[in-house]
Image (spheres, grey):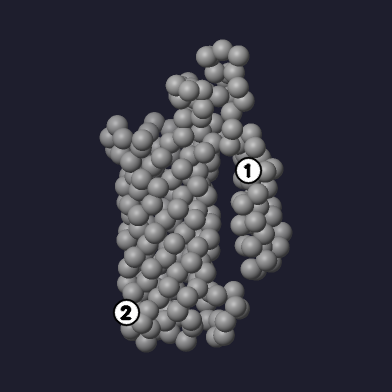
């Protein structure tokens, strides 16, 4: 079993996001993410090695090098597809998502995950408008054991619901905030089961009126593939 300490990058991300209230906190968190290449160059570039043998810091948990044949970090993509279900007092939504996780820090298992979602929403008037969303999630995997992985994830995104809005008295376009936990299980050599649960917040951040938000749990189940 492997347990990882919290990376400094994740600590800073969480501190900034929680220190400021409401929309200011989410905006500051996204600003920190935009500045990572400037303040954390070591995350995006591996120091040159005097020989072809990687140092222990450049070894993954299985002992394999995280460097490719050219000496650069071996970045792993994981295409994924899953179905999500969210609900709350102001309505809910069922969506099919496609995305891909980009593991830019193989040692600490930190990933960025862009996701597109398409589906059907339901507001309090029983209308069933279409919903389209884009989320940018961060994932950190602190625990691995015998083919199982447990991760934390959090992030933000945008969505559009039409022709009716959801919630019914709200706006068509809204922002999204998501946070939760998930698991991956090694089904085959390059395919994993993907499942998670968390909290979903939808609102326009008072950019427009009315600002009727949605808060409620979100669950998802799907597959991911390793490359």
Q: Residue at x 64, y 68 (%)?
A: 23
Disc assigned to residue 58: none
Residue 179 visible to the viewer: no
Nearest the eye: 83 or 33 = 33
* Position of residue 41 in the picture relative to residue 202 (left or right): right
Nearest the eye: 184 or 26 = 26
Q: Residue at x 45, y 65 (%)?
A: 217
Q: Quadrant of residue 192?
A: top left
Q: Position of residue 144 (x, y in %)?
A: 46, 35
Q: Position of residue 33 (x, y in %)?
A: 61, 51
Q: Position of residue 148 (x, y in %)?
A: 40, 37
Q: Residue at x 45, y 53 (%)?
A: 114
Question: Relative to 200, is 190 above or below?
Answer: above
Q: Which residue is mark 2?
A: 128
Residue 226 visible to the viewer: yes
Q: Can you name the residue that lies furthest to the front here? A: 70
Nearest the eye: 117 or 186 = 117
Q: Can you name the residue that lies furthest to the right here? A: 19
Q: Nearer the viewer, mark 2 or mark 1?
A: 1
Q: Position of residue 119 (x, y in %)?
A: 32, 68
Looking at marks 2 and 1 on the same chain, the residue that comes earlier in the sequence is marked by 1
Q: Which residue is mark 1?
A: 37
CA–CA distance between discs 2 and 1?
A: 42 Å
Label 2, residues with CA under 10 Å away: few <14, some 14-19, many ≥20: many
Question: Relative to 195, is 90 above or below?
Answer: below
């Amino acid at each position: 079993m492997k347990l990882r300490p919290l990376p400094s990058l994740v600590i800073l991300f969480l501190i900034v996001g929680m220190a400021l209230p409401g929309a200011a906190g989410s905006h500051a968190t996204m600003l920190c993410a935009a500045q990572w290449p400037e303040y954390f160059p070591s995350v995006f570039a591996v120091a040159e090695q005097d020989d072809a043998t990687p140092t222990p810091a450049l070894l993954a948990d299985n002992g394999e090098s995280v460097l490719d044949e050219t000496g650069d970090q071996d970045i792993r993509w994981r295409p994924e597809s899953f179905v999500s279900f969210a609900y709350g007092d102001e309505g809910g939504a069922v969506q099919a998502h496609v995305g891909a996780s980009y593991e830019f820090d193989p040692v600490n298992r930190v990933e960025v995950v862009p996701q597109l979602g398409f589906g059907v929403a339901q507001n309090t008037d029983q209308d069933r408008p279409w919903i389209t969303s884009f989320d940018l999630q961060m994932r950190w995997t602190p625990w691995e054991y015998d083919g199982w992985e447990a991760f934390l994830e959090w992030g933000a995104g945008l969505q559009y619901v039409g022709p009716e809005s959801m919630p019914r008295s709200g706006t068509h376009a809204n922002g999204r905030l998501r946070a939760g936990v998930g698991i991956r299980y090694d089904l085959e050599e390059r395919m994993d089961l993907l499942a998670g649960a968390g909290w979903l917040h939808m609102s326009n951040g008072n950019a427009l009126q009315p600002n009727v938000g949605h808060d409620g749990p979100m669950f998802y189940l799907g597959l991911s593939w390793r490359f």
